[in-house]
Amino acid sequence: MIVINNKNNYRAILIVSFIAINILVLFGMSEILGYLNSGADRSSMLHLEKETLDTYLPKVTWETFKNQGRRMENQTIQKIEKHYLFSYVIKNNALKNNVNDGIDDYFTESSRKQLEQIIAYNKAKKISIQSTIIEHHASLDFYSEDGQQVVITDKNVVEFQNVYQDNKLITSVRDTANYKVLMLLEDGFWRIRHYVRMQKEKSLVAVELNKKIYTVKGNEILKNGAPYIIKGINYYPKNSAWDMFGNKFNKDTIAADFDIITKAKLNTIRIFVPYEEFGKAEVSKEKLDKVKIVLDLAEEKKLAVIVTLFDFYGDYAPESWTLTHRHAEKIVTTFKDCKNIIAWDIKNEPDLDFESRGEQNVKPWLEQMIAAVKKFDANHLVTIGYSNIASAEILKDKVDFVSYHYYEDISLFEEKLAVLEKAAKKPLVMQEFGLSSNRGLWSWFGNSKEKQANYHKKMQSIFKKKQLAFVSWTLYDFPKVPDKVAGKWPWIKNKQKQFGFIDSEGKNKPSFLYINY
């Protein structure tokens, strides 16, 4: 009996083992077949799609389809566009980091060989290329009857490249060309089969009627054809400094402040639009609504407005340019018909980023953003607010008027101004100036309120004598200053708090007498 039971046990063990081995074999084969047939990992594809949406958002326009061959389906053209843009993300990443990641999915075997050769060469020579394309103007030339091939012409493609060797900038290239592109559908991917570079064509752009209220002529800013001298102030509400459009936004507070500014016989305010807080490439409608309230209130009080874009923005790398274009496009087109905007100020003190971000990155970004804003809005002027008078000559030929900040010795001002006037030959605006009245525990040798008043008295006398445009810093002393503005050290932060003409209790300081001339 025991022998029979043992035989049954052995038989059961053998059967179970056989079944288990077969299951493992089948599982292994399915994994191998799955791998061979899968192409790209879908999770990585989803990651790539998100990465593309986060890093590459060029403007894409398609001409009306008049292609040869099969009629194009909406779903198909959307997929073609997505994969075409993905191919640029993959190629740009490959040339920047000298890696082959994703090339198999968006380039056919023959086209990726050429790209891989370039990558291998650049890697050996320690060359890295950072590049981007801002706009694609595509037309569909051919769509095969079997739905497997398309030919696209991408017109007037503007490409920017920074070329590095051993982490040192060798050259910057800005180029415009047309491309004929052949794409094949393989394994569910529209892959690049071939690029052919062609000469660019003349762009036929519709010219809008000029609706400009503020213009420039020679060294003057004009309003409706008459000279307009900016007499302004940088504005934040007292209790929401550097967060004007945040949770403390209050229409009544702003209206009351604008009354103060108007009664002081100032005619202009400067406000700031922070890039991240406004939603980066996906601009918040709530924030835009608040900007409109401010602009409408300013118009009611007969105040003109300089709008400073990209506040606290610091990533000038080419791969991020398309995101900043979408940000600027949304804001600028929303308010392009606003009658009391004098100018779009592209960036506050961008020259301070030259050392940390690289002048070779900052200046091209500024230049292309000036062009973009002018394209989005032909009705308003464009300027850049540089941190000092010496930097103000940068890109002077690209802006409509030159803006500079001045926190240096008053005795040197007129001499430095004469140098800039000779070089710029355009209207000049002192967009920031001021003196802190911070004096106390953390600043024993700081300036008193009386010294601050004397400073503004001297500056206003110069402005009156030379009829200069100015925008003071700032209306209020601030109870709080964010760390991102002045850091955490109290001797720095406290100084930043007390540049105002009105103290944090709402009382006029002695300097208020010299807020204007």
Image (cartoon, helix red, strand yellow):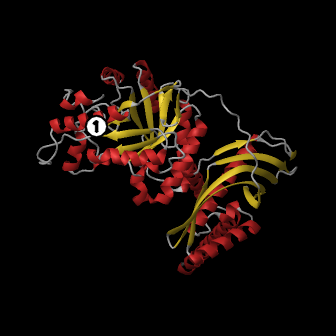
Residue 344 visible:
yes
Q: Which percent across, then down, holds residue 296?
A: 45, 22
Q: Is residue 473 above or below residue 408?
A: above
The C terminus lies in which quarter of the figure?
top left
Q: Which percent across, then down, holds residue 245?
A: 39, 33
Horizontal side of 192 relative to 66 (left or right) equals left
Pick out the residue farthest to the bottom: 3
Between 55 and 128, the residue placed more toward the observer is: 128
Residue depicted at x 68% and y 65%: 104
**Callout count:** 1
Q: Residues within 10 Å of mark 1 (few under 14, many from 20)?
A: many
Horizontal side of 303 relative to 83 (left or right) equals left
* Amino acid of disc 1: Met
- At mark 1, the secondary structure is helix
The N terminus lies in which quarter of the figure?
bottom right
Between 430 and 384, the residue placed more toward the observer is: 430
Q: Is residue 43 above or below residue 285?
A: below
Horizontal side of 232 relative to 286 (left or right) equals left
Q: Which percent across, then down, holds residue 60?
A: 67, 44
Q: Is residue 269 above or below residue 496?
A: above
Residue depicted at x 22% and y 41%: 436
Q: Which residue is mark 1?
A: 459
Residue 477 visible:
no
Between 48 and 396, the residue placed more toward the observer is: 396
Q: Is residue 158 above or below residue 383?
A: below
Horizontal side of 282 relative to 355 (left or right) equals right
Q: Which percent across, then down, holds residue 59?
A: 64, 44
Between 390 and 340, the residue placed more toward the observer is: 390
Residue depicted at x 20% and y 27%: 508
